[in-house]
Image (cartoon, grey):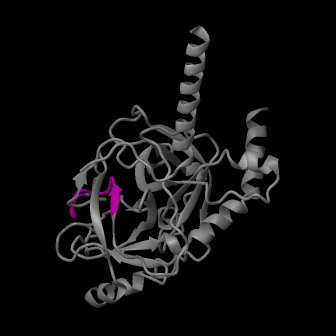
């Protein structure tokens, strides 16, 4: 009986280990489910476990959103074992390029200025239970991001961390979409801590969410011609006309999440919209989103060619170990 009990416990332990491993390796899954967001609904803790908050150092003030993405799509079998072992220490986050390099501004936020907070829900609690702060090793902006033009072409940034992220009910990666040159269709969820009303200039304490329909470019640009100057072949429009529901300042960099057959993917990044003369949010028009499906190859290539990041990581470890 003792042997049988031990064997049973061993099987249970193995099954629990496999389930834990599956949860870590499988992207786009969440445990908490609920039946920038102006006019949206408040979310529950852990409802969007891939949503992260970006804060400024040393004030720890929130400035943009981001998305924890799965790395399973970008591992390369051609790399040597040492490189793979080091590369697996990194975690990757998507955000908007304009969060780090504003239009018509010389200001540039580098990795030392930014902290990524995973598992975050309440911005009013500095050390919230279930959340953790992570320093950024490198911020990579797409080379086509041009601060001198009106267009928000290639408004995407990839962030690398050099310390581990512990997965939990509140912290999970989302899947990358399959590469596609087709236009985005359907609808998705946008969640973030952005301003709660068009004339508010304070971010929300808790993230809010809205269901956002994708709008064809023909309809989008015909209805609001000025949006055509912000968009490009690698963006899409989404939102409502005249309903006062829209992402707002502070939601930038957050994701446009869409559920597939068995998992969630990040199809877009909150990029840009028109503003009122007083710089308040214009919530009655559509919003421009970066089309992630058209930039998946860039994401994969940057991570697969990350030897310079590994070198920087090794140098960092050596300096710390002195």
The count of marks equals: 0
Q: What type of secondary structure mainly makes up the magenta span?
A: loop
Quadrant of residue 197 in the image?
bottom left
Q: Is residue 12 left or right of residue 43?
A: right
Q: Quadrant of the N terminus?
A: top right
Q: Position of residue 244 (x, y in %)?
A: 18, 68
Q: Position of residue 157 (x, y in %)?
A: 55, 63
Q: Position of residue 70 (x, y in %)?
A: 55, 54
Quadrant of residue 253 in the image?
bottom left
Identify whether 309 is placed above or below 318: below
146 or 130, nearer to the observer = 130
Q: Give the residue furthest to the left.
A: 243
Q: Position of residue 227 (x, y in %)?
A: 35, 83
Looking at the image, can residue 52 be seen? no
Q: Quadrant of the C terminus?
A: top right
153 or 268, nearer to the observer = 268
Residue shown at 17%/71% (left/top)? 243
Residue shown at 29%/67% (left/top)? 212
Start and end of the magenta stretch? 189-200
259 or 103, nearer to the observer = 259
Looking at the image, can residue 149 be seen? yes
């Amino acid at each position: 009986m003792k042997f049988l009990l031990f064997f049973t416990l061993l099987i249970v332990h193995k099954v629990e280990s496999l389930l834990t491993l599956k949860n870590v390796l499988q992207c786009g899954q969440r445990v908490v489910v609920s039946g920038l967001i102006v006019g949206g609904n408040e979310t529950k803790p852990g409802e969007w476990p891939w949503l992260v908050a970006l804060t400024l150092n040393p004030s720890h003030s929130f400035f943009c959103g981001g998305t924890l993405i799965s790395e399973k799509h970008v591992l390369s079998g051609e790399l040597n074992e040492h490189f793979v072992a080091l590369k697996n220490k990194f975690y990757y986050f998507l955000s908007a390029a304009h969060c780090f390099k504003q239009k018509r501004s010389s200001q540039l936020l580098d990795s030392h200025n930014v902290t990524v907070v995973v598992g975050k829900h309440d911005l009013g609690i500095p050390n919230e239970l279930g959340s953790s702060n992570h320093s950024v090793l490198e911020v990579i902006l797409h080379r086509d991001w041009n601060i001198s033009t009106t267009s928000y072409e290639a408004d995407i940034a990839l962030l690398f961390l050099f310390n581990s992220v512990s997965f939990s009910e509140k912290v999970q990666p989302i899947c990358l979409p399959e590469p596609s040159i087709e236009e985005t269709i359907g609808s998705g969820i946008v969640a973030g801590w952005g301003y709660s009303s068009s004339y508010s200039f304070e971010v929300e304490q808790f993230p809010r969410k809205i269901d956002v329909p994708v709008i064809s470019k023909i309809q989008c640009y015909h209805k609001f011609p000025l949006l055509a100057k912000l968009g490009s072949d690698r963006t899409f429009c989404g939102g409502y006309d005249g309903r006062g529901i829209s992402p707002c300042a502070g939601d930038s960099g957050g994701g446009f999440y869409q559920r597939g057959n068995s998992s969630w993917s990040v199809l877009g990044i909150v990029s840009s919209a028109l503003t009122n003369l007083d710089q308040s949010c214009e919530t009655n028009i559509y919003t421009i989103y970066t089309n992630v499906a058209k930039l998946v190859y860039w994401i994969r290539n940057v991570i697969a060619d990350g030897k310079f990041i590994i070198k920087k990581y090794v140098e960092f470890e050596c300096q710390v170990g002195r």
